[in-house]
Image: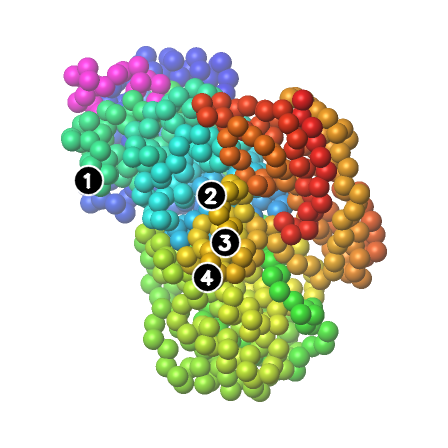
Amino acid sequence: MKVSQETENKITEMLSEMTVEEKIGQMQQISYESYRPEVFERFRALGAGSFLHVLGEEADEIRAEAKKTRMQIPPIFGIDAIHGHSLCNGAVIFPSQLSAACSWNPSLVEEMGSVTAREVNADGLDWVFSPVLCLGRDTRWGRVDETFGEDPYLAGTMGEAITKGYEKDGLVAACLKHYIGYGEATGGRDSYDTEVSIRKVRETFLPPFRRAVKAGASTVMTAYGSISGIPMTLHKQLLRDILKDEIGFEGFVVTDWYNIQSLRTKQKAVESFHDGVRLAVEAGNDMSMNTFRFYDSAIEQAKAGKLSMQLIDEAVRRILRVKFSLGLFDPDKKRLPREVIGSPEHIEVNRKLTRESLVLLENDGILPLKTKPKRIAVIGPNADDIRAQYGDWTFFSHPNESPADCKPLGDYYTVLRGVKTVFSESEVVYAKGCHLMEETDDSMLAEAVTLAESADIVIAVIGDCLKQNGEGKDRANLELSGRQNELMRRLKQTGKPVITVLVNGKPLCIGEAVKNSDAVIEAFNGGDLGGLCVAELIAGKFNPSGKLPISFPRSSAQIPCYYNQYSGWHGGKYMDVEEGNLYDFGYGLSFTNFSYSNPTLSSAKAKAGDTVTVSVDITNTGNIDGYEIAELYYNDRFSSVLTPEKQLCGFTKLWIKAGETVRAEIPLAVDELSLIDAEGKTVLEPGVFDIMIGGSLASLQTAELIVE
């Protein structure tokens, strides 16, 4: 977001001319599908500040309407663009954020943001509700697929990158959400209370937002839930004191859907609707999403002297600041042609990211396939289900669920189509095998087994579906649903090699499926090209490099199982579950092997403000070229408050040829080793730190750093 004194002077002049009604109109966002047509038309005519889920020509009509108002202030149009301009059928659908995070490639994630910005702009819109900077630490939560995973450093790196992609050309404004701690709600319950301290907020949940704000994010969205019983919509300390005053955020804050109304109807935090409106503005919210009664209530209270005009002017200034930054007042604002939507150039970016987002979890040597199979059996409930492959937040699921016969207008590949395309010389047969959410007849399983018995290899595509992911779809049981485990057992009993592909919105308990597989590929929600890139990986057209941004539990009751926990657990494990995770954060295989040696620090001693270079030799000991992700962690051996046993603090992704050794170097700012003390202050405590580097948590090599 661009801020200049010239713009601030223009805003000051505008504020001096605006009526109370015009100012509060700027603070109102309205969504067409939420209300009766006459309500929507009212806000069109009076010049509401923002409209939501309006596409294409309708946005142009509303702009024309705004030009008829006295102040002629253009509206800003918001859209949920979580992984591409995905509510627009025909736009490029990228992998989900969780899937994209598997790439550990900020450059590609930034390109994803740039492509999304161009396609959103070409559709006449200016504001994307992305990135999601919540952390997926409790995988029972329904919205894990929207996150960049469980780690604040990786989420912050990816959030910073995609924010730069959205904002760099001035085409759209990014919106950081959901501020804050939303994904940590007790029991993984969507929109519920998050029982964490402000110290924990500062240590774990605030860093990704801080980085994305510094990267230029224009807007922030408040979370539905609460922090220790205080609704985020009313949390002045976090919204006004920390976000705006301390971090220096200069854009505007928008509530989430109906948040102000929900203060009374759901959270029971205010006795009257008027109280909710007033307290929300005082806490630091600048725009009300969809609570249309906000407009009349705010006007009434402002005229009665109950709602501060100074706070209203501040909110409107922030909103106008973003609109000026986007060039909305400029009649010649850059608008790209609609032909860029789904263009070949954008599809190529998607292909690169999708390839790097696939994670090879298991491989007994079957991959890549050495010979072309004569007959391939593609089996499983997600083998030919594009809705499951897309995941949440596409035109299939929002704003309203699309009819069953709705088809993507762009080119897309399920795993079945991908296999048929890549293995065009092989005979490919298909059976669904079982349902995910419905009863499965024995005949479905029998058909799948018969096809598997007749094939040279089996590609089993399992996981979850839209009914098991999203808002209000929290899961207590993370086991594979339906008869998927039975299907996997019976496929393995055929004696044919089984390559398992996971199409899922979150980590599931897949231990039994893994035992019945010769190879396992994690695809998460891979978007348009997920199926094609899976087939290319199986064929060996590229060497997989993805690593998990999130841990996989062995059992549902093992949640939360994120890697960066505190020490001190008596026994260190549940007595009835094998120790450790099924797969750790940062885990992923390649078609080759890498060895690490000679970890060194540029200095064995350092102080605040210093940067230490961590170096290590990485050798590709196999016979295939490939990317390797070197992961850097630290541990503060002794500290005044508990700190994680391991915490990611850097990484690099390198292309290493077969037999080659490269010297990887990762800069480590010593201030990154700071902790949040008991008073909530950021402190770098002197002492000994273990600096660990390697290709996974299980293979880290350690060097010692003394901080003076």
Q: Amino acid at mark 2?
A: Leu
Q: Is residue 156 above or below residue 435?
A: above
The mark lying in front, picked from 1 and 2, is: 2
| Quadrant location, the C terminus | top right
Name the element at disc 1: helix
> Which residue is under mark 1?
265
> Which residue is under mark 2?
135
Q: Is residue 616 above or below residue 347?
A: above
Cα distance between the residues tagged 3 and 1: 41 Å
Stretch in magenta: 297-315
Name the element at disc 4: loop
Q: Amino acid at mark 1?
A: Thr
* Callout 4 crowding tier (Cα within 10 Å): few <14, some 14–19, many ≥20: few
Cα distance between the residues tagged 3 and 2: 23 Å
> Which residue is under mark 4?
576
Which image quarter: residue 269? top left
> Which residue is under mark 3?
573
Q: Position of residue 444 (x, y in %)?
A: 42, 82
Q: Position of residue 240 (x, y in %)?
A: 38, 23
In the picture provided, is 305 more to the left or to the right than 621?
left
Provide the major secondary structure of the magenta segment.
Answer: helix
The mark lying in front, picked from 4 and 1, is: 4
Q: Are marks 4 and 3 in contact (CB under 8 Å)?
A: no
The answer to which of 254 and 84 lies nearer the viewer is 254
Q: Position of residue 35 (x, y in %)?
A: 22, 44
Q: Are marks 3 and 2 in contact (CB under 8 Å)?
A: no
Q: Amino acid at mark 3?
A: Lys
Name the element at disc 3: loop
